[in-house]
């Protein structure tokens, strides 16, 4: 090549060299004491360039010159952070911890009062859990994720089909109302399904209220609320995917994203798919340890931008699941037969919900929801075919007048229920349950002395089966300091019971169901005292103490009586009192080096006092604890998460006086560890081990399932009264019963996954 051709190229490269040398980048993460801070402004003042953090608090600035620059980070509710940063050839990564201002907005909650308020200012204690909390121990559904919440326990109710419910402060699942975006679309028949199939990546936050809230939400809100709030389509990621697999052969995938349609509309779509099809029998009883499942759920939410920031959203979800458990040799052709035992459940469910703020000067919000749940189930040769539909409409008026913050509303609920059990029998034959329940409610939140709050509320429900039902509530919030408050709550609750939609033991056919009387609605009153204190240190550390004492008293409570007759379950209104009382404590700490520690414990005493006896209900622990420890290993761009829980002994449902199984479970613990690599753009890789102690409930127990070798009781001998009697092949006089269960049967297992977000 001619040298006169080379010289211009050399000159060009020399001229570009300084510019190329300046092409640096600055990356980092912005957090506060509770996790990542999304949408924080990150700005290099002398260069007049900047960006905003994403939903995980991450930011990236490119094309920067070498040298020292002044970085300014700001976000609403936090003190502005300034520091000098050095940008060099190796690039830089920062960890920035923002400190709250005295007027920090904190987390916004809506569950406690049906209004969007700052959590610290809410007179009702509301616990809030973010997606970062869920990601510490990835699960295939929200039901399993709640095992890390203090005072909340996912309870498995059957060794075969693994159905379950959520216990809050020792109260069983039917006392917990599950909502999605504030709408009570989850019915008694579908409580566990309401917590399955929502892609975890679509969850904005989970709000939990412990204690009655029937004055705002009606029936079922006796023991507490779980409100799953999904992301707003206007601020959701354009695309996300999160998939993992476990050593047991479980596969879970969440995928979806948001799409803008026109100037004022954005739609958010999410899909969850879960599959587990590897029959496993590690405890050697010839029954599957874990139910096999094939599940898909599709969720879509539309958000519309309107004048004056008025709200308008529509959402829908479709859920389908095919699950079975039973003898290892069971296949679908044995469904409904009495040769090989299996519990096979087909579930099809769809839901619609919408919120629309009327175009009026006053703030009037119309909320509607509808769900249709159909279940086609066989428990051995016993069918359970059910159809439930619930429609809900509510109009609320939010009005501020001086120091008074008023909420007035009217609601109408429609319940339809039909099945093939005695629940819908009548002298005329099958008679589906159709009920319209109109309601009125009012609430006044009064602020006095600048910081303190007094709340009073009342709800009236007209139930055609039970007449007028009144549920008052009250709350006092005293702000003792800038980051310290005391809250006292009083409330009542009621619940109209449908046994066959809620109690799995009534469905298995293992025992006869005896409804001894016309069942009246359960009623309760609750007292809750809550203390919250937050500490912020000058060197960037954060500590908080959240303590509560609670007391709940029931009347007319309906408890299944397993003890009077091992072959029957008796249901009647309790002639006496049932009390749940206890104390819970949550401690949180976040240090400037990135270490985060959270620990909680609940001590509780649940007792039933009736007919001169005082007893403890089955499946109720006296104490429990949860913890999580998270620590960033910055040189490797890793985060380590260690999570766990501990439960005290529970009384278990024995199947007879000669039953050799322990009456009480041992104390047991599930512990997990996970490592997450965050060194790739838009991507995280995670892996870990679940159930590090390899705990399973069959330890120290002769068997879990009674008469697993004879599930149709073909070799059981009965006396003239129909009760089983001991025989050579049945020395304990038992019948088939899979209800002796209190924890998961899965032992230690590894898992690995990939998370991507754009």
Image: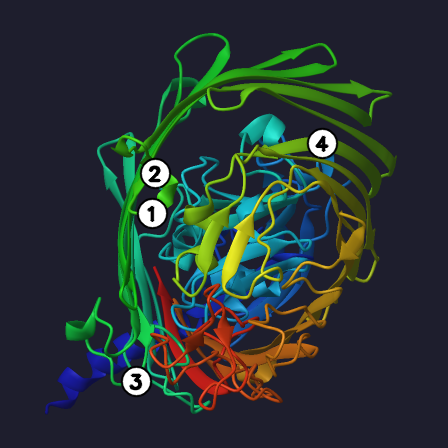
Q: State the image coordinates of residue 239 (x, y, percent, origin top left).
A: 30, 57
- Secondary structure beneath label 1: loop
The residue pinned by badge 1 equals 421
- Could you tell me how far apart the alpha carbons at marks 1 and 3 are, in whole angstroms? 28 Å
Compared to 719, does 353 lie above or below?
Answer: above
The quarter of the image holding the N terminus is bottom left
Which is more N-terminal, label 4 or label 1? 1
The residue pinned by badge 2 equals 424
- Could you tell me how far apart the alpha carbons at marks 4 and 3 are, in whole angstroms? 48 Å
- Could you tell me how far apart the alpha carbons at marks 1 and 4 are, in whole angstroms? 35 Å
Q: Badge 4, how many Cα within 10 Å: few under 14, some, many 20+? A: many
Residue at 15% x, 84% y: name it: 4
Q: Nearer the viewer, mark 3 or mark 2?
A: 2
Residue at 47% x, 91% y: name it: 728
The residue pinned by badge 4 equals 491
Residue at 55% x, 69% y: name it: 136
Compared to 599, does 555 lie above or below?
Answer: above
Q: Nearer the viewer, mark 1 or mark 3?
A: 1
Horizontal side of 509 relative to 486 (left or right) equals left
Q: Tags 1 and 2 in contact by the CB under 8 Å rule?
A: yes
Q: In which quadrant of the rendered view does residue 358 lie? A: top left
Horizontal side of 5 relative to 396 (left or right) equals left
The label on residue 13 is: none
Compared to 183, does 683 lie above or below?
Answer: below
The residue pinned by badge 3 equals 328
């Amino acid at each position: 090549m001619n040298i006169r051709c080379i010289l211009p190229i050399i000159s060009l490269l020399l001229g570009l060299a300084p510019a190329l040398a300046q092409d640096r980048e600055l990356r980092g993460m912005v957090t506060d004491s509770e996790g990542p801070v999304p949408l924080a402004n990150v700005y290099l003042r002398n260069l007049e360039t900047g960006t905003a953090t994403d939903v995980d608090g991450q930011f990236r600035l490119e094309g920067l010159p070498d040298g020292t620059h002044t970085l300014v980070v700001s976000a609403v509710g936090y003190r502005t952070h300034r520091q000098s940063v050095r940008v060099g050839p190796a690039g830089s990564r920062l960890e920035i911890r923002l400190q709250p201002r005295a007027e920090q907005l904190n987390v916004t909650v809506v569950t406690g009062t049906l209004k969007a308020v700052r959590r610290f200012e809410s007179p009702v204690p509301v616990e809030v859990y973010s997606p970062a909390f869920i990601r510490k121990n990835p699960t295939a559904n929200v039901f399993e994720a709640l095992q890390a919440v203090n005072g909340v326990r996912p309870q498995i109710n059957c060794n075969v089909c693994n159905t379950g419910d959520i216990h809050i402060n020792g109260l069983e699942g039917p006392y917990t109302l599950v909502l999605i975006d504030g709408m009570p679309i989850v019915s008694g028949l579908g409580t566990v399904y309401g917590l399955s199939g929502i892609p975890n990546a679509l969850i904005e936050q989970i709000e939990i209220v412990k204690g009655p809230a029937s004055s705002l939400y009606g029936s079922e809100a006796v023991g507490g609320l779980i409100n799953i709030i999904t992301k707003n389509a206007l601020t959701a990621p354009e695309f996300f995917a999160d998939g993992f697999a476990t050593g047991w052969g479980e596969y879970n995938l969440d995928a979806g994203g948001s799409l803008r349609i026109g100037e004022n509309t954005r739609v958010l779509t999410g899909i969850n798919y879960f599959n587990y099809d590897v029959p496993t029998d590690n405890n050697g009883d010839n029954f599957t340890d874990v139910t096999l499942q094939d599940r898909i759920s599709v969720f879509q939410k539309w958000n519309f931008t309107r004048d004056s920031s008025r709200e308008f959203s529509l959402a829908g979800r479709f859920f389908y699941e095919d699950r079975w458990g039973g003898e290892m040799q069971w296949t679908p052709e044995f469904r409904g037969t009495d040769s090989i035992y299996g519990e096979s459940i087909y579930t099809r469910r769809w839901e619609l919900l919408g919120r629309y703020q009327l175009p009026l000067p006053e703030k009037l919000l119309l909320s509607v929801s509808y769900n249709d749940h159909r279940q086609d189930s066989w428990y051995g040769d016993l069918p359970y075919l059910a159809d439930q539909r619930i429609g809900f409409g509510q109009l609320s008026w939010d009005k501020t007048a001086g120091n008074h913050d008023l909420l007035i509303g009217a609601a109408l609920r429609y319940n339809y229920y039909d099945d093939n059990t005695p629940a819908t029998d009548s002298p005329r034959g099958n008679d589906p349950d159709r009920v319209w329940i109109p309601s009125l409610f009012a609430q006044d939140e009064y602020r006095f002395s600048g910081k303190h709050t007094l709340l009073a509320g009342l709800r009236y429900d007209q139930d055609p089966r039970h007449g007028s039902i009144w549920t008052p509530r009250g709350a006092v919030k005293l702000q003792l300091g800038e980051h310290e408050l005391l809250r006292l709550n009083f409330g009542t609750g009621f619940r109209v019971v449908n046994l066959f939609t809620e109690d799995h033991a009534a469905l298995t056919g293992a025992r006869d169901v005896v409804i001894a009387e016309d069942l009246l609605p359960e009623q309760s009153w609750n007292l809750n005292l809550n203390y919250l204190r937050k500490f912020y240190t000058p060197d960037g550390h954060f500590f908080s103490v959240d303590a509560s004492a609670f007391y709940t008293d029931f009347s007319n409570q309906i408890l299944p009586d397993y003890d009077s007759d091992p072959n029957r379950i008796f249901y009647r209104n309790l002639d006496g009192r049932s009390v749940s009382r206890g104390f819970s404590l949550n401690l949180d700490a976040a240090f400037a080096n990135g270490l985060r520690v959270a620990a909680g414990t609940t001590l509780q005493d649940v007792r039933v006092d009736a007919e001169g006896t005082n007893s403890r209900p089955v499946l109720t622990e006296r104490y429990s604890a949860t913890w999580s420890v998270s620590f960033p290993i910055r040189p490797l761009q890793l985060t380590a998460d260690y999570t766990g829980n501990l439960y005290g002994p529970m009384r278990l449902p024995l199947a007879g006086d000669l039953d050799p199984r322990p009456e009480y479970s041992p104390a047991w613990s599930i512990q997990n560890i996970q490592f997450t690599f965050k060194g790739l753009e838009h991507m995280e890789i995670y892996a870990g081990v679940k159930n590090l102690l390899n705990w399973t409930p069959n330890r120290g127990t002769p068997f879990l399932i009674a008469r697993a070798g004879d599930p149709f009781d073909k070799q059981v001998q009965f006396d003239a009264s129909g009760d089983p009697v001991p025989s050579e092949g049945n020395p304990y006089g038992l019948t088939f019963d899979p209800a002796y269960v209190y924890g998961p049967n899965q032992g230690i297992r590894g898992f690995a996954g990939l998370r991507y977000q754009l």
